[in-house]
Image (cartoon, helix red, strand yellow):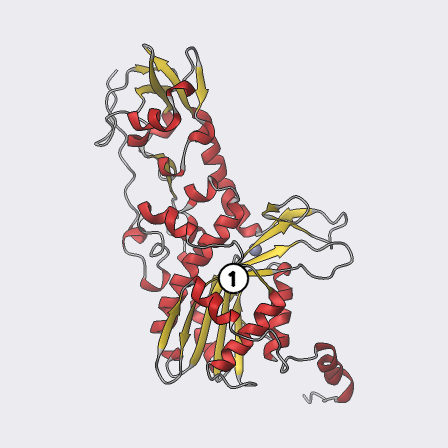
Amino acid sequence: MQRRGPSRPKTPEWYKNPPPHLVPFVMFSNRSSIASVLQSFRLDDRMLCYNGFVAKLYNWCVSLGFTPGKIMPSRAFCSDESQGFPIILMAKHFGAFPFNHGRVGGIVSLERHGPHADHGKDLLLVQASHVGYDPETAEFGVYRRLHTEESVNTCNCGKIGHILDWYRSEYAYARENIRLLRHEGQPAVLIDNLLLSGRRSQGLFLVFENLVRDAARGLPSPVAARSTGVVYSAADSLVARLGEAVWPAEGWVAIGPRLAAGDFYFERDWGGMDPTQNQLERNIVAPMPWILTSRHPFLTAACANTLAEFDRCYRSLSQSAVMRGKNLLFIAGVNIDISPYPGESFPLTKFAPWAAFVQRADGPRELLEQDEVLERLGAQSAENPAQLALDQSIDTMTTHREVIVRL
Ligand SMILES: [Zn+2]
C-alpha cells in the first residue's frame, strides 16, 4: 500500500509574527538548543533560603545606590497562597508591601511597568515561577495544604499542572501507540494512524526521521499495514540508540519511555485566543518534550517558564520609556515551596535565581547570568537592620492613631 507522508500543519500566523512584547519563543526558538538551555538553569547548591535572600537583595539594592525608604519592590508571582511568605518577607525587608506585577503561574504583566514606576523612586522587580516540594517523599509538584480538612497534598503550581495534563495525555498515547516489532526479521516500527495524520490542527507530532528509515524528506513507503497503523523499517539511528535486543523476536513492545524528547513536538491550536491569556502555555510549549521526559516535570516546567519570562520581561523593561532614568533591579528565579509541617504557618520557601538586569538611573545597564547573580548576592550581608518589625508596625497602625473617613 502506498501512503503519502503526512504534511505538517500550517504554521499559525502568530507563531511567525508574534507581537514584539509578547514573543514567547525567543528563548526556545531554536529546537536544537532547548536541552542545553534548560540544563543551564542549575539548581545544585544554588537554592537560597528566602529570608537571607531578601535581606541580601535589599543590601544589593542599597549598594547599587538605591535610596533606603524610597525603593518600591514589586513581585510577579503566582496567585497561590504558598507565595505569601516571600511577599511578607519582601514587605518586611523593603518596608513596603510589594506592587503586584504577577499573573497566575508567575507571568509578568508587562503593562504594569508604568504604575510600578510611578510608585517609587527606585524599583525592584522579582519574578518567580514556583513548584511545590514534599520533603518526606522528595517529590516536586505537590504541596501540603494545611488549611484543607485533611491537610492533603495537591498540585503546585496548579496552573502548570493544569497545562501539563493535556500534553501528558498526548505523550502517553504516543508512548503506547508506537510499537517496536520485526518485519521479515528486521527491526520495524508500527505507528498509529492518528500520529501519522498531518490534518490535525494540534497534538503530538513525530520527528519521523528519528524513528523511520529514510524519512528525512518525508515518510517512505511502508513495509506493511495494520488495522489502525502502518509499519515502517526502523531508522538505523533508532536501532543504534535502543539496541536491537529491544525488538522482540515475536509480537511487539510499546516504545514507552524510549520515545525521547527529540523524537516529537507539539502543535497547539490557539484559536485566535488573546496571547496574554495563555502566556505560560506559550512559554513552555516548545520545551514541552524535554519537560515531560525530565525527572521532575513540574520543576523543569517552572524553570522553563522563568527562562522565558526573564527574556520577555528584560526586553520589555529595557525598551520601556517609563523605566528611563530609574534605578531598577530585575531578578528572576524559581520559588521552591517546601511543604509546611503541621504547626508551621508558612512554607520553607527557597529561591533559585536565574538571571538579573540592573539599570542605573544615570544610564549604565548590566545583564547578570546565574553565577554572577549568586556572586553579587553572596557578597551582601544577610543582616538588614532597616527591616520592619511587622507586628510592631501593625500595632502602631491599629492602636496609636485613628482617622475618621469623612463623607
Ligand atoms: Zn501557581
Q: Residues within 10 Å of mark 1 (few under 14, many from 20)?
A: many
Q: Tell me which corner region of the image, top left, top right, bottom left or bottom right, holds residue 346.
A: bottom right
Q: Position of residue 406 (x, y in %)?
A: 69, 89
126 relative position to 246: left or right: right
In depth, the one of 288 and 149 nearer the eye is 288
In this view, 176 is above or below 344 = above
Q: Quadrant of ligand 1?
A: bottom right
- In this view, the residue in front, 232 or 118, is 232
- Residue shown at 40% from the left, 56% from the top: 275
Q: In terms of secondary structure, where does tag 1 sit?
A: strand
Percent across and percent down for residue 397 are: 72, 84
Residue 82's x, y, as percent? 63, 59
Above or below 364: residue 192: above
- Asked whether residue 271 appears in the rendered view, the answer is no
**Residue under the point 52% across and 49% down:** 299
Q: Position of residue 319 (x, y in %)?
A: 33, 73
Q: With 50 as the anchor, is 229 left or right in this view?
A: left
Q: Which residue is mark 1?
A: 128
Tag 1: residue type? Ala
Q: Quadrant of the C terminus?
A: bottom right
- The reply to whether residue 56 is in sight is yes
